[in-house]
Amino acid sequence: MRRLFGLIVVLVVAAGAAVLTWPSAFGLERTLPLAQIISFRAPLTAVFVALTMLMLLFALIRPIRALALALALVLGVAGGVNVAVVTQRGMGTEALPAKTDTSLRGHDVEHCGLGDLGRDDRAVRRRHAGRCRHAP
């Protein structure tokens, strides 16, 4: 009975780790809680690594060694995949791309009135064309 319980726990944790690591494989990348969690992939990776270390510590306790090692394996793989994703996509940068004639930034956006998010695109373009020297 204990083995069955341990197997169920490992499978549930593996399913949760798989959904958190690769939600698009399950069609859940746009669902409400997962989209917000995945946007914080670097802290999620740290949580996976910390839980892996905790499971390795629990593996020192003989009665739960098999369960702890299985969970450490699952969480370690999830953490490793997330590290690879964060490394591949990058950690972000503060630098903006080079400004071009068609790019809008800071003063241009406020000056042109393009900062209004609730506006219809056509109305914004008309207002932009009427006010700005660099109209399209």
Image (spheres, helix red, strand yellow):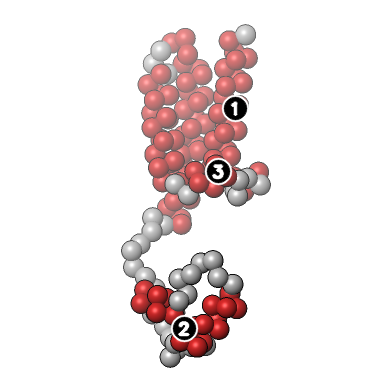
Instruction: Judge by depth and name the residue closer to the eye, 64 or 106.
Output: 106
Q: Which residue is mark 2?
A: 102
Residue 91, horizontal then vertical, whole percent:
38, 55
What's the amino acid at mark 3?
A: Leu
Residue 38: assigned label: none
Q: Which residue is mark 3?
A: 34
Q: Are marks 3 and 2 in contact (CB under 8 Å)?
A: no
- State which tag comes first along the sequence, 3 or 1: 1
Name above or below for residue 5 compared with residue 34: above
| Disc 2 to disc 1, C-alpha distance | 50 Å
Query: Closer to us: mark 3 or mark 1?
Result: 3
| Disc 3 to disc 2, C-alpha distance | 35 Å
Q: Which residue is mark 1?
A: 12
Residue 36, horizontal then vertical, whole percent:
50, 46
Identity of the residue drawn at 41% across and 46% down: 42
Corner quadrant of residue 51: top left
What's the amino acid at mark 2?
A: Thr
Identity of the residue drawn at 35% across and 62% down: 93
Tag 1, which secondary structure?
A: helix
